[in-house]
Image: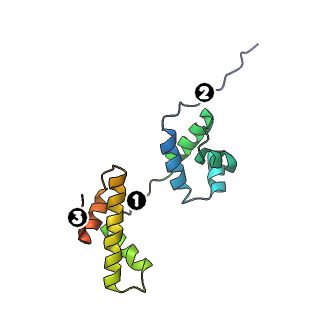
Amino acid sequence: MTPKKRPTPPAIPTVPAALLRARLEHELGAVSLRQAAREIGLSPNAIKNFLAGAEPRRTTRVKIERWLASRPEKPRTEGLGHFVRLLQQITPDLGERDTRHLGRELSRLLLDTYRRNRLPPPRWVREVARHYGVESP
């Protein structure tokens, strides 16, 4: 009689759940929940529950980690030029003076939010603040 082969156990999850949730939410901005669920091999409800804070099974975590690792890395679009263009696109009816004022206020808001969260502002935020004449703390 031949011995039965045991299935190999899945890899041990390595990514903290909070980071996994954040990355999964980010990726769901690019694909639908149903599409992601199909690609991952989970039900849409399993993904919703995980995003809502449920502690997933080890196999579920591994599936999510593998799917995220297989996703192509997107080029970073943050930067001063991107911010200025975006601001101009969303405020076509405002004059240049009002658009600059809005840019200054958004710069302050970004800096204050990072400061409140005790995080150093990323380079692009500092560049935007400098461009609009806002002092970085």
Residue 110 in the image, given as x and y percentages of width and height: 35, 62
Q: Secondary structure at mark 2?
A: loop
Residue 133 in the image, given as x and y percentages of width and height: 23, 71
Mark 3 Cα within 10 Å, few/some/many (few <14, many 20+)?
Answer: few
The residue at the point 38 percent across, 63 percent down is: 77
Left or right placement of residue 109 versus residue 29 in this view: left
Q: Are marks 3 and 1 in contact (CB under 8 Å)?
A: no
The residue at the far top in this view is 1
Give the vertical position of 85 relative to 47 (above or below): below
Front residue of this view, candidates 26 and 18 = 18
| Res 20 visible | yes
Q: In the image, which disc is placed on residue 135?
A: 3
What amino acid type is highlighted by mark number 3?
Glu
Residue 25 in the image, given as x and y percentages of width and height: 54, 53
Would you identify the image quadrant in which residue 128 lies?
Answer: bottom left
What amino acid type is highlighted by mark number 2?
Pro
Q: CA distance from mark 3 to mark 2?
A: 54 Å
Residue 68 in the image, given as x and y percentages of width and height: 52, 47
Q: Secondary structure at mark 3?
A: loop
Q: Which label lies toward us, 3 or 1?
A: 3
What amino acid type is highlighted by mark number 1?
Pro
Front residue of this view, candidates 40 and 29 = 29
Residue denoted by label 1: 75
Q: Earlier in the sequence, mark 3 or mark 1?
A: 1
The residue at the point 33 percent across, 50 percent down is: 119
Residue denoted by label 2: 9
